[in-house]
Image (spheres, rainbow, N blue to C red):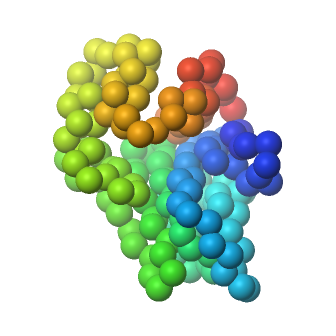
Amino acid sequence: MELSLPILTTPVAAVNEAGLGLVMGFGPSRHERGRAPAALLLRDCLERFESVEPALAWCLGRPAGAPGLILLADASGDVAGVEILRSERRVRRPVNGLLVLGRPEGREAALAKALSDPERSEPEIERALVAALPDTDPGAIAQIDPLRRRLRAASGAWLEV
């Protein structure tokens, strides 16, 4: 199952039947001659893989234009991120149970605090995310749940595979 934007042919968030979930983050767009957009890697991963490690290897080894941020998570709880830069690719792993891709500048502490209460309801989690990321449009927040094989856009209903 994929979430996309009307102007895109690629997903921005997705989860497959096996429980592999992916989210694409976008940076300033610069066309790189001979390189496909990094977002195309999401569909490849959805079709080919069931877990983070082989999908991560695929994202590291395939050509893709920079910049790109890909978050990968699977039903086993494994999580990783890939930063696709012009000259390199960086693998990111969670620190203290939290992975923030992009420009986190101090956001990790606010997010960790916002998400630390396991009794929070989904609306409370969404409000905490919006509060911790004040420069993010609340309508741009998508959530994936690889364990339950579902995803949702902003405040919408969960869609299950």
Q: Quadrant of residue 134?
A: top left
Counting from the top left corner in percent of width and height, residue 61 is at 56, 80
Horizontally, residue 93 falls left or right of residue 9, namely left
Count of number-bearing discs = 0
Q: Quadrant of the C terminus?
A: top right
Counting from the top left corner in percent of width and height, residue 105 is at 26, 53
Does residue 134 sit above or below 127 in this rendering?
A: below
What residue is rendered at 41% in x and 39% in y? 135
Counting from the top left corner in percent of width and height, residue 97 is at 26, 44
What residue is rendered at 69% in x and 49% in y? 11
Does residue 73 sit above or below 110 in this rendering?
A: below
Counting from the top left corner in percent of width and height, residue 94 is at 29, 53
Q: Nearer the viewer, residue 28 or 143?
A: 28
What residue is rendered at 35% in x and 63% in y? 92
Q: Is residue 42 visible?
A: yes
What residue is rendered at 49% in x and 47% in y? 74
Q: Is residue 41 visible?
A: no
Does residue 115 sit above or below 70 in this rendering?
A: above
Q: Nearer the viewer, residue 145 or 155?
A: 155
Q: Nearer the viewer, residue 26 or 116?
A: 26
Horizontally, residue 82 falls left or right of residue 6, namely left
Q: Quadrant of the N terminus?
A: top right
